[in-house]
Image (cartoon, rainbow, N blue to C red):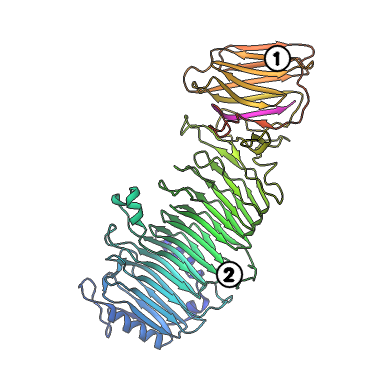
Amino acid sequence: MKHGMIILMLSGLAVWSPAIRASAATTVSLTDAPFSAVADDGKDDAPALQKALERLIAEGGGVLHIPSGQYDFDSRVSVHGSFSRLTIRGMGASITRLHSRNGEGVLKIEAGNGDAEIGIMDLDIVPTRADAGTALELTKPFTEPDEVPYNLLLTNIEFRPNNNETDYFTRVIVAGGWKPLIDNINSSGLYGPKFNTFEGKRKKYRAESILTLKPSYKPRVRYCNLWAATHGIVIELTDAHEEPTLDGAVSVENAHGIRITKTGDRPLSSPVVIVGCHWNNAFSGLVMEHVDRFRLVQNCLYGAWDVEPDYRDIRLVDCADGELMANSFWFGVRQRPLIYIEDDCRDILIRDSYFGRGCSRTPVVIEEGAQNIEVTRSVYGTVYAMDEDDTFGLWEMEDVENGRALDKDLLQPGRDNDLNLAGAVPAPGSEKLKLGGALHFPDSTSRAKSTLAWDGANGVRIHAHVRIDRRAERQALLTVPGVFALELHFDRLCLIFKDGRGDRQVLQVRDVAPGRRWIPVFAEVDPETGRAVLEAGGLGGDRRFADTLRLLRRQAPLIMGATEECGGFSGALDQVWIQRR
């Protein structure tokens, strides 16, 4: 255990300015004379902290230790001046506790010089009333300090309310002008049973913001838990090369999760990076505006149980040169677009992502004007073991004028196969087919091989699981117009195709699927052997042999059920493997 602590301390110092490690700074304690704060006495400790910080700033900086116990603040401590570095260190979260009893906040530090450095760590800052002001406000003149890893370090700080149903900071952290590392910060606004109703939600987000960085140079936010405020993380980038990194940052159950806005025309020197985060908010997830380089990797996104109808997990406005890779979009109560690409977005790749079934039948919406948007090698569906009754939906893509989005390679399978996925449904009120995605799920299930569309061939092999909707008289499960159709007529499963003479042939299996359950289906038309087979659930089979048996060769998209009620499905198809012969 001791070895682990030593490693942690060394790793923490590694991201701090080299000057701090080399300096023999002035060190004082808040409880020493002449400051003489007394923990746990219930008296106002703001004057003691004011004197201690003023002394350190007058001496050009130093280290302030705050021993264990509770310290109370009836007014906000506010200091300003020029200094090299200033460190405030407690004895640990839940051990050193600063309680705010006023409506302005706890601490405001305004550095007068651009090369100032501040570190605050290992303590709790606690609101003990409603609308308790700004917990920490830290500003300095904006510079581009490439010579130091970070010049603002906030780490191991808890901003939890004294009473979670009544107490909250209006704003938790407001910082501007820094190259900050925000590390292991936990903060919450109001929460509790009475806020878990729809009416309670309206009162929940009284806190304005948790983390506001504007402007900041190359900010990094990691391992933070930010709950129950109007805004979780707000980062404003200016013309400087300020690319933020969020890794392991958590923004959960805020009204708005993460907002990153870039102003000015100067391009970023390297991309905005968000990796290993998750957000679960009510009004919006991640919003990025005018960001010209970004990478979103291995994030988990899901809407809160009470998300607003216009909630979007990711909304991109006038963004370019971006990659969204290996992100998971999980179930939501309200169906909605998951990724919304607006305005003049361009050159964006979405790949290797998982889109949960319950979230949307339109996972990605691309507005007119967006260019060169590609989605590939992603999956869309549900977890059979979790919810057997839930069906898959068909992915319907919005058309864009400047280059078709996602016509091919939309959801490529992980297997060696040269077939592209390109499902289709008729556009409302039109016979024109609208290209979209179908289904795929990785090898974690043994119920099917993989999901592929079929662009027409002289033979077909289908491995599928279907589920019967007893309310429907006829269910078109898989159709390639003029080539074949896999349909359900009451309790009969039918494979309908045309042979080499153009005659309509039907194979059928009777008495399939009593009740609502998944039924394995195998169908094959093999022109080389003259063999056609249809089997369903082991309940009998229909086999036919003919010397001239073959499907007419035809290029045609695959239609899956194409009913408005089921968003592309009547009944259900789990996974389909369609193989060119």
Q: Is residue 54 above or below residue 215?
A: below
Could you tell me if the residues under marks 2 and 1 are in contact, i.e. CB atoms within 8 Å? Answer: no
Q: Residue furthest left?
A: 41
> Observer-nearest residue: 362 or 248?
362
Q: Residue 519, percent across and down?
A: 54, 22
Question: Does the segment drawn in magenta span residue 108?
Answer: no
Q: Is residue 50 above or below residue 308?
A: below
- The majority secondary structure of the magenta stretch comes to strand
In the shown orientation, is residue 294 left or right of residue 57?
right
In the shown orientation, is residue 187 left or right of residue 35?
right
Residue at image location 29% in from the left, 77% down from the top: 75
Mark 2: few/some/many CA within 10 Å (<14, 14-19, 20+): few
What residue did someone put label 2 on? 263
SS at mark 2 in the image: loop
**Which of the image's four quarters has the C terminus?**
top right
Residue 452 position by quadrant:
top right
Q: Residue 427, percent across and down?
A: 63, 37
Q: Residue 293, percent across and down?
A: 63, 61
What residue did someone put label 1 on? 505
Residue at image location 47% in from the left, 84% down from the top: 112
